[in-house]
Amino acid sequence: MKYQKVEGENNLIRETGSKAILSTDNKALAEYKLARALRHEEKNKIIQCQKDINTLNKDIKDIKESLNLIIEKLSGN
């Protein structure tokens, strides 16, 4: 593959066969990958929090039902 520099752009090259323009800015690529990993990690944290909240809601519902049964038994109904 042969590459040509893109006029007026220090971090861009053109692949002569396909005419594709490619970036040679490795620092920007590393920053993008880090930001993407951080977004992915944050998304996973949110999903885990949602699962925890759903579990807590179910547990509270189960506790309420149990307390209602105990109250019914104690009141003789």
Image (spheres, grey):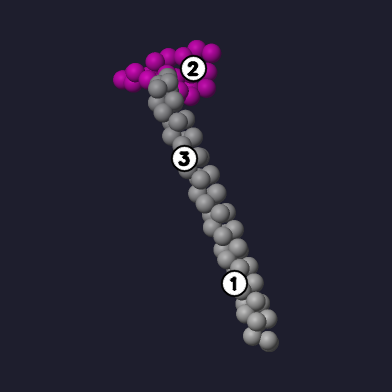
Give the residue type at disc 3: Arg
Is 3 within the magenta? yes
Tag 2 secondary structure: loop
Which residue shows up at 53% across the image and 13% down it? 1
Residue range in magenta is 1-22
Give the residue type at disc 2: Thr
- The label on residue 64 is 1
**2 or 1: mark nearer the eye:** 1
Q: Nearer the viewer, residue 57 or 30?
A: 57
Give the mark nearest the N terminus, 3 or 1: 3
Give the residue type at disc 1: Lys
Instruction: Kindly identify which residue carries mark 2.
Output: 16
Q: Nearer the viewer, residue 6 or 54?
A: 54
Q: Residues within 10 Å of mark 3 (few under 14, many from 20)?
A: few
Residue 9, percent across and down? Answer: 34, 21
Q: Nearer the viewer, residue 73 or 36?
A: 73
Which residue shows up at 61% across the image and 74% down it? 67
Q: Nearer the viewer, residue 50 or 72?
A: 72
Which residue shows up at 31% across the image and 20% down it? 8
Above or below residue 73? Residue 13 is above
Number of numbered markers: 3
Q: Quadrant of the C terminus?
A: bottom right
Residue 64, percent across and down? Answer: 59, 72
Instruction: Kindly identify which residue carries mark 3.
Output: 39
